[in-house]
Image (cartoon, rainbow, N blue to C red):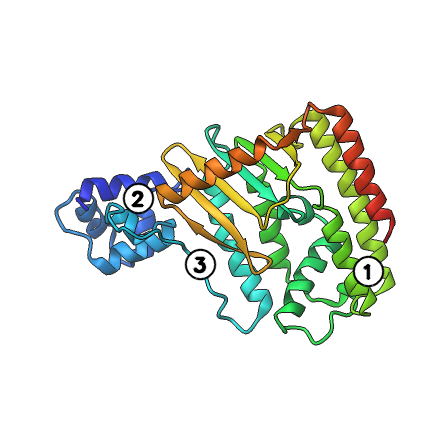
Amino acid sequence: MKTDKLVKLFRERLPAGENLAGTLTEVLCIGREAVYRRLRGEVPFSFDEMAAAARHLGLSLDQIAGDTCSHESFDFKLLMSPDPIQNYTLIAERYLKLFTYLANDPTSIVGTASNTLPFTFYAPYEYLSRFRLARWMFQNERLDKMGDLSSIDVPQELIGLQERLIDAIRHAGRTAFIWDGNVFRSFVEEVRYFRGLGLISDMDVEKIKGELQHLLNEVEGFCVQGTFQNGNRLDIYLSNIFFETAYSYVEKTGFQTSLFRVYSINFMDSQNPHICRMQKEWIKSLKRHSTLISQSGEMQRIAFFAQQREYVETL
């Protein structure tokens, strides 16, 4: 790729408020004047330098090459650390970078079709978040027994990182969720299952139940207003059909990516234009089989939240 096109691509992916020369100086570990020579095209970027910059800015090498490859590429960060908390932190850091890039841009759009309770909603709640983390750790044999959720040592650094991620996600210009009818019920059934195995305590279940009740009230308020608390647009649809996993599509001017949920808390993603177009069309097709309950569909909204509260009461 020619230097001017490469620099343009770097600038498009640079988070708001950052200086490209300063960022490259830090990432490439070279002097500022050496960076300027590369930006002016006097010295070409080496392959290693392009790879390092692409990794930092969330670009794939096929994008830098002009996306001439015939195959469709996905990015999936394997969890290599034996420490599950560190793995979780790395996942959160990765997506904080993505959603910080989208935040406060009026052109940014986030669309998600989800059959499980989304991170966007459960993460602010201590016990809902701890349960999802403990469930993932136990399933991956990182915990012999879940025990009291309060006994899990969650570093303050991770808590702060998670708070920043939630804030960034809710600052997209426009957010739309499509939920199937089991979105809360599936969470309740998971809690009931692990309680039945004696893996979480009665006190944990009571805490989870109280937080789910609070969350239902919060989300119902979002639906009535059609916005998050910060005023950013939120549309929630109820699907009349079920789907296999969580699909997300995010975009802003000059950028787009698609995400597929895998292994409970992780995602694989692709910025390939063909994949993004298919993902966007798939989510759009699900809307045709769904009912909008944000500032609309009042009867369906009331019935949905009444049903979810019944599920929660069974805990």
Q: Nearer the viewer, mark 2 or mark 1?
A: 1
246 on left or right of 152: left
Q: Position of residue 170 (x, y in %)?
A: 59, 38
Instruction: Say which residue appears at 72% left-offset and 59% top-offset.
Output: 131
Query: 196 or 49, which is in the foreground?
Result: 196
Number of the label disc, if any, that sits on residue 231: none
Q: Secondary structure at mark 2?
A: helix
To which residue does mark 3 refer? Answer: 76
Residue 102 visible in rendering = no
Type of amino acid under label 1: Asp
The outermost residue toward the left is 42
266 on left or right of 253: right
Rendering quarter of residue 295: top right
Q: Secondary structure at mark 1?
A: helix
Q: Position of residue 161 (x, y in %)?
A: 58, 53
Is 74 placed above or below 217 here?
Answer: below
Q: Position of residue 177 (x, y in %)?
A: 61, 37
How many C-alpha atoms fall within 10 Å of the one at disc 2: few (<14), some, or many (≥20)? some
Q: Earlier in the sequence, mark 3 or mark 2?
A: 2
Query: 93 or 62, which is in the foreground?
Result: 62
To which residue does mark 2 refer? Answer: 10
Q: Nearer the viewer, mark 3 or mark 1?
A: 3
To which residue does mark 1 refer? Answer: 204
The outermost residue toward the bottom is 144
Q: Nearer the viewer, mark 3 or mark 2?
A: 3
Instruction: Say which residue appears at 57% left-offset and 71% top-offset.
Output: 83
Instruction: Say which residue appears at 26% left-offset and 54% top-offset.
Output: 50
